[in-house]
């Protein structure tokens, strides 16, 4: 086999911002769904949902930071 067959694919970052925006959208939907679930949850389950939503919000902050980095690197 030739070297060309084993070389890694080039890093295509052209759609990273779009992918990150989709991840933000999906995460927000998960937060909203979890809020709805809290109406039917027990005390401990509610706390687990609150904790998980906090982590989701932190993830969204990270996604937004990555979007800013991508926009800067594309300029």
Image: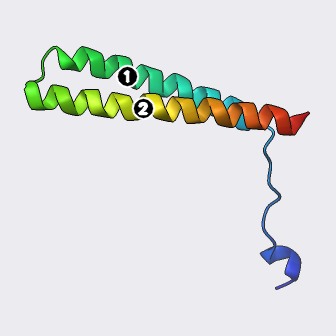
Disc ID at residue 56 = 2
In the picture of the structure, the residue carrying the numbered disc 1 is: 31
Residue at x 75% of width, y 37% of height: 69
In the rendering, at what x and y percent does residue 55 appear?
A: 39, 35
Which of 67 and 7 lies nearest the eye of the viewer? 67
Locate residue 65: give its quadrant.
top right
Q: Residue furthest right?
A: 75
For marks 1 and 2, give the CA distance.
Answer: 7 Å
Q: Is residue 15 visible?
A: no
Residue at x 25% of width, y 14% of height: 36
In the rendering, at what x and y percent does residue 62 appear?
A: 57, 36
In the rendering, at what x and y percent does residue 44 appear?
A: 11, 32
Give the quarter of the figure containing the N terminus: bottom right
Disc ID at residue 6 = none
Q: Secondary structure at mark 1?
A: helix
Q: Residue furthest left?
A: 42
Locate residue 33: give its quadrant.
top left
Locate residue 38: give its quadrant.
top left
Q: Secondary structure at mark 2?
A: helix
Which of 45 and 18 lies nearest the eye of the viewer? 45
Q: Residues within 10 Å of mark 1 (few under 14, many from 20)?
A: some
Residue at x 21% of width, y 33% of height: 48
Which of 43 and 34 lies nearest the eye of the viewer? 43
Mark 1 vs 2: CB contact within 8 A:
yes
Give the quarter of the figure containing the C terminus: top right
2 shown above or below 73? below
From the viewer's perspective, is 57 left or right of 34? right
């Amino acid at each position: 086999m030739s070297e060309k067959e084993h070389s890694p694919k080039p890093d295509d970052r052209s759609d990273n911002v779009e992918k990150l925006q989709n991840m933000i959208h999906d995460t927000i939907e998960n937060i909203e769904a979890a809020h709805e679930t809290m109406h039917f949850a027990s005390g401990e389950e509610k706390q687990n949902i609150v904790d998980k939503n906090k982590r989701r919000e932190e993830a969204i902050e990270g996604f937004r930071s990555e979007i800013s980095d991508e926009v800067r690197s594309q300029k």
